[in-house]
Amino acid sequence: MAQVLILVDHTSAKVAKTTGELATFAKRAGDCVGLIMAPAGQGQALGEQLANTLIDQVIAVESDDFARHGAACLVDAITQVVEKVRPDAILIPSTSAGKEIAGRLAIRLNSGVITDAVDFASDLSATQSVFGGSFTVSSRVRVGIPVITIRPSAIEAEVGGSAPAFERMDVVISDKAKLVTITDTKPAVKGGRPELTEARVVISGGRGTNGDFKPVEALADILGAAVGASRAATDAGWYPHTHQVGQTGKTVSPQLYLACGISGAIQHRAGMQTSKTIVAINKDPEAPIFDVADFGVVGDLFAVLPQAGQAILAKRA
């Protein structure tokens, strides 16, 4: 039975969600060990948040140096934990920070790295969607300990039955890892909707909105969904670039993706094609988005979305 180490992203507002997904993948291979890189004195509290996951053991490394010196310091500490634990694979959230850590860690461990995986198997192989979503490939690291980043929402997190065992581990951060000092940070400005890459439901608008995202936002609020946008919409200044979904934007893999007024160019499909269920709404029956959609509605989004919202509210009443 293999042992898989997962990196807990405690900077996310939904610690248990992201970590629960990684743990669900890890348990396919064997035992799951969660690693928390925590500020001094916070390891125990963060570990308690993982009580309902499939993690068998939690290891906490505590240091204020992580926030002060960034990725190099984190990787220095993670490397020491890996050398002690000797896991068979390492899973990391596929965020911008996670991919930076994965790349640095793979170099330190002289290991192969796989990024943006959408699946992980018991034989430690990973599945990726590549070339703009045109192909699905299965890959396996042959050198060293596999370091794999997993896209958020790539799987439904399963619930565990008992609290994992907890252990603190001491490490020694080298002076070389402290050469960079972070002098100031500012949290991203967030609204009341879920984070785009973590949301279970994403509703995106494109050129067909003509700059009016009100119907998209209204349905998103009813469903508790995140709002995305195509490149055409963000380039036109209709919606912030931080919400762009696609090859040059963010990659999402929600349980449900609604594409509203989006033609479905390959650049956009590359960022959402791994969604579990795709619903397309477009006036053009020949729009390429229908080629990847599970369900399609040929119609005007300004008529379809309000009706859908009313029907959903009626069902809830």
Image (tube, helix red, strand yellow):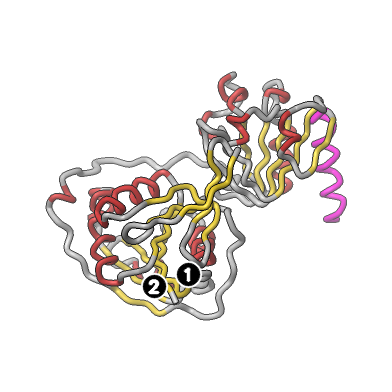
Residue 36 seen in the current view: yes
- Identify which residue is drawn at 33% across, 48% down: 103
Prevalent SS, magenta region: helix
Residue nearest the viewer, comparing 73 with 146: 146
Mark 2 in CB contact with mark 1 (< 8 angstroms): yes
Q: Position of residue 155 (x, y in %)?
A: 59, 58
Quadrant holding the N terminus:
bottom left
- Identify which residue is drawn at 44% across, 40% down: 188
Give the number of the mark in front: 2 or 1: 2
| Amino acid at pointer 2 | Val
- Identify which residue is drawn at 17% across, 63% down: 172
Q: Position of residue 70 (x, y in %)?
A: 27, 48
Q: Which mark is residue 50?
A: 1
Residue, disc 2: 58
Q: Position of residue 80 (x, y in %)?
A: 23, 64
Report the number of discs. 2
Quadrant holding the C terminus:
bottom right
Q: Position of residue 108 (x, y in %)?
A: 24, 54
Q: Secondary structure at mark 2?
A: strand
The image quadrant of residue 48 is bottom left
Q: Is residue 236 magenta?
A: no
Q: Residue furthest front?
A: 142
